Image (cartoon, helix red, strand yellow):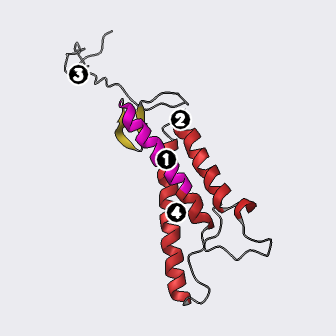
């Protein structure tokens, strides 16, 4: 016996209208100079902007490593001033690390490799023993190492 009070309506064009948009986001690593890195539609399909994204990613990773190993605060600095400087440095380091993480979430192989290269060169120049002046015990760095 059919149900009373319910009638089937044929779908109209308005009710089944689906927006189809080509997405620049990938969920697995890919190679290419297109995509979205941090900002929507950047670099898009422009190769020159992709190279800008690569350079920006490298500099960001390099700068994060520098912040991890720099010694900007003099030993005789007031504790309150030193604490404020450390807080500002941590804020900058964490902000840049998060921006770098967003760039890596583009899953672009070139962005990934250039970020690793920036961290590696930054650590080699600022954190390794390759350029230390003496074998004497190191002064403490301003910021503690980043830990997850």
Residue interval drawn in magenta: 46-62
Give residue 74's position: percent from left, percent from top.
58, 83
Verify CB contact (< 8 Å) between mark 3 and mark 2. Answer: no
Q: Position of residue 142 (x, y in %)?
A: 61, 74
Identify the element where label 2 is drawn.
helix
Are the residues tagged 3 and 4 within 8 Å (C-beta)? no
Q: Residue at x 48, y 27 (%)?
A: 32
What residue sits right under mark 1 in the picture?
57
Residue drawn at (54%, 90%) of the image: 78
Examine the structure image and report whether residue 51 is included in the region drawn in magenta.
yes
Q: Nearer the viewer, residue 3 or 29?
A: 29
For this orientation, the residue located farthest to the top is 1
Secondary structure under tag 1 reads helix
- Mark 4 to mark 1: distance in Å? 14 Å
Q: Quadrant of residue 71?
A: bottom right
Label 4 vs label 2: CA separation? 23 Å
Gap in angstroms between the C-alphas marked 3 and 4: 49 Å
Q: Secondary structure at mark 4?
A: helix
Q: Which residue is mark 2?
A: 110
Q: Which mark is residue 93?
A: 4
- Residue 91, given in percent of the width and then of the height, sits at 49, 67
| Crowd class of label 2 (few under 14; some 14 to 19; many from 20; radius 10 Å) | some
Q: Residues within 10 Å of mark 3 (few under 14, many from 20)?
A: few
**Magenta: predominant secondary structure element?**
helix
Mark 3 or 2, nearer chain start: 3
Left-right relation of 73 to 15: right
Sequence-wise first label, 1 or 2: 1
Instruction: Return the residue nearer the eye: 48 or 61.
Output: 48
Residue depicted at 28% across the width and 22% down the height: 18
Kindly indicate whether the residue at mark 3 contacts the one at mark 1 (C-beta within 8 angstroms).
no
Distance (Cα) linking label 3 and label 2: 42 Å
Q: Secondary structure at mark 3?
A: loop
């Amino acid at each position: 016996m059919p149900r009373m009070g319910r009638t089937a309506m044929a779908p109209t064009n308005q009710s089944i209208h689906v927006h189809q948009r080509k997405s620049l986001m990938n969920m697995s690593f890919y190679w290419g100079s297109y995509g979205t890195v941090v900002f929507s539609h950047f670099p898009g399909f422009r190769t020159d902007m992709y190279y800008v994204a690569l350079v920006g990613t490298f500099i960001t990773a390099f700068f994060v490593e520098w912040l991890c190993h720099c010694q900007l605060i003099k030993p005789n600095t007031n504790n309150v001033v030193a604490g404020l400087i450390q807080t500002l440095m941590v804020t900058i380091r964490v902000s840049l690390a998060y921006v770098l993480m967003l760039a890596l979430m583009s899953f672009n192989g070139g962005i990934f490799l250039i970020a690793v290269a920036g961290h590696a060169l930054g650590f080699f120049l600022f954190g390794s023993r390759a350029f230390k002046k003496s074998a004497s015990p190191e002064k403490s760095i301003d910021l503690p190492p980043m830990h997850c």
